[in-house]
Amino acid sequence: MKRARPGDRPDSAGHTDAETFARAMEGVRPIAPDPRGRVRSRPLAPAPVAANPAALAVEEPAGGIDEPFAAPGVDHRLLRRLKRGNIAPTARLDLHGETAADAIVRAVRFVDASRHRHRCICIVHGRGLHSSGKVPILRTQVRKRLRAHHAVLAYTDAPRHDGGIGAVYVLLRK
């Protein structure tokens, strides 16, 4: 014997939930997608700032850390301009030789200090060629933290002439 699901049971008027929903949706048309490719979303809540560098660790996103990042609602054309170097950074931070914890703290402070004065910044973290196991520790940790920072709209590898994969161009909120 087949068991009735909640949506299959008729209400007091003898209509199932599916029939009631179908009647309520008569004449409703879906909203057309934005032809410019923008995605509308609610603004992100500011991320809490921790005093402990170990507490600044962020889980790796599904898309991978090496992929360019754009916050929800950022036009893909803006990310393309950033990637090509059409938006020039007006401030630069070099993290070579720093430990991962110190680099994260310095990068977060740099973003916080730059956010009201600069639209685009460059953070040089290196390619990780001299790290143990040739694993780019600074690159991975800094980009994880940038992805979680509330002031970061987008980031991508710097153009080849400005450091390539050893640096990141960061677009900040206005």
Image (cartoon, rainbow, N blue to C red):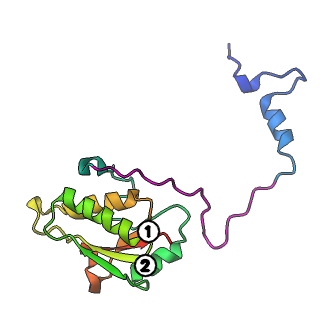
Q: In this orientation, which residue lies closer to the viewer: 124 or 82? A: 124
Disc 1 marks which amino acid? Ala
Q: Residue pushed farthest right?
A: 13
Q: Position of residue 71 (x, y in %)?
A: 48, 62
- Indicate the quadrant containing the N terminus: top left, top right, bottom left or bottom right: top right
Task: Answer whether residue 140 is visible to the viewer in this image.
Answer: no
User: Which residue was labeled with disc 1?
Assistant: 154
Sort mark 1 into few (<14), some (14-19) or many (20+) by Cα contacts within 10 Å: many
Residues rendered magenta in the picture: 29-51
Going 73% across and 63% down the picture, which residue do you hit? 32
User: Which residue was labeled with disc 2?
Assistant: 82
Q: In this orientation, which residue lies closer to the viewer: 94 or 31? A: 94
| Secondary structure under the numbered disc 1 in the rendered image | strand
Q: Main secondary structure of the magenta part?
A: loop
Q: Position of residue 75 (x, y in %)?
A: 55, 71
Going 20% across and 59% down the picture, which residue do you hit? 102
